[in-house]
Amino acid sequence: MKVTLSVIKADIGGYVGHSGMHPRLMEVAEEELRKAKEAGVIIDFHVLRVGDDLQLIMTHDKGVENGEIHKLAWDIFMECTEEAKRLKLYGAGQDLLTDTFSGNIKGMGPGTAEMEFEERPSEPVIIFMADKTSPGAWNYPLFKIFADPFNTAGLVIDPKLHGGFIFEVIDVFENKKVEFSMPEEMYDMLSLIGAMEHYIIKSVRRKSDNEIAAVSSTQRLSMMAGRYVGKDDPVMIVRAQSGFPAVGEIVEPFAMPHLVAGWMRGSHHGPLMPVAFHQANPTRFDGPPRVIAAGFQLANGKLIGPRDMFDDPSFDEARRIANQMANYMRAMGPFEPHRVGLAEMEYTTLPEVLKKLKGRFVEME
């Protein structure tokens, strides 16, 4: 059976501040998706949240970037925004950059990750959702999962993985893309993807048959809006087992909380902390950045799950290290590298502050 898995997210109101989501917003989303399921628009759905971001997980048979599915998500976000306004939640409708749907949700604020594939006899998928960070946060784990044999043993010992993968990398500033074949072009790709706010891994495909393996959201809110309106809070879908990395290989990179951009006001570097669903409430300095992982088995388009993949004591050490890293980075205050570099600060509110200093600079003798 050919199925499309769509994950569409938006920040449509925080409770309290940017730290969490009011349960009523999730109830509204579930009510509307239930109606869509009964009407045959979608096959199945699940609603989750990470921090103040609402996550709509849907299966259907309409393919990626389908207008009807995107309009469904947009209408839900608009209705949730009205509920957020009634509750006076913070930043109601923050990610919605327009009041009018234009046929496709891309470029309108919400983040999207979608893939279409033929269901295997067993189809495990893991959906990663992050808050207080940007799409480049997925570069490190995607590289580790699909290109690093020290992380993924299957790249060495599994003949179905041994041939490698194709990475699609996007230049978000130039609106261009390039593909790299792993492992032979590894060094070339690493020369780019280490710049996580400039070059972002969009998708990964198996080299042997071009089968989709992973896809991420790459929307940059500030670049779409022309001003700072919040961090992008990305999502990612990864298929597991039987020709793809094992579940354990997919979650393994998050045992090391790598540094990502975002955190407070989208202006600081901090550790990406893997947490259970109930711990996805970033409050310390609006952080540190959080990531949750929802595991599902697909069965004829039905979402069997979710399993909370980071609700596991083996990730306790990662959380402890992340807190130590947070302490260290916070001690730097407004100094780099805790605060992101000036190029990234141009997409925050800092330029408004710096305007008053322009006239005070004089030529040196």
Image (tube, helix red, strand yellow):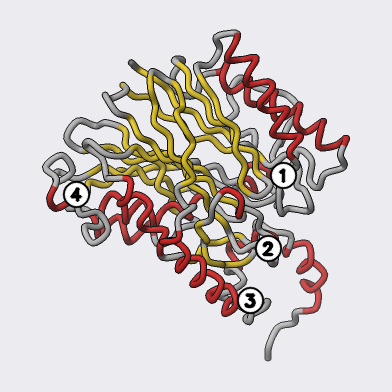
Q: Split into 4 quadrants, where in the image is the C terminus? A: bottom right
What type is the residue that disc 1 sits on?
Met
Identify the mark nearer the N-term, 4 or 2.
4
Determine the CA span between mark 3 and mark 1.
25 Å
Q: Nearer the viewer, mark 4 or mark 2?
A: 4
What type is the residue that disc 4 sits on?
Gly
According to the picture, the residue beneath numbered tag 4 turns out to be 154
What type is the residue that disc 2 sits on?
Met
Determine the CA span between mark 2 and mark 3.
11 Å
Determine the CA span between mark 1 and mark 4.
38 Å
What type is the residue that disc 3 sits on?
Arg
Query: In the picture shown, does residue 25 fall above or below 117?
Result: below
Residue name at image x 14 percent, y 43 percent: 163
Query: In the picture shown, does residue 347 fall above or below 35?
Result: below
Determine the CA span between mark 3 and mark 4.
38 Å
Q: Residue furthest top?
A: 39
Query: Is 240 or 329 nearer to us in this picture?
Result: 240
Identify the mark nearer the N-term, 3 or 1.
1
According to the picture, the residue beneath numbered tag 2 turns out to be 264
Determine the CA span between mark 4 and mark 2.
38 Å
Identify the mark nearer the N-term, 1 or 4.
1
Identify the mark nearer the N-term, 1 or 2.
1
Confirm or deny contact between disc 1 and disc 2 (CB under 8 A).
no
Residue name at image x 48 percent, y 23 percent: 59
Confirm or deny contact between disc 3 and disc 1 (CB under 8 A).
no
According to the picture, the residue beneath numbered tag 1 turns out to be 21
According to the picture, the residue beneath numbered tag 3 turns out to be 330
Confirm or deny contact between disc 3 and disc 4 (CB under 8 A).
no
Which quadrant holds residue 312? bottom left
Q: SS for tag 3? A: helix
Confirm or deny contact between disc 2 and disc 3 (CB under 8 A).
no
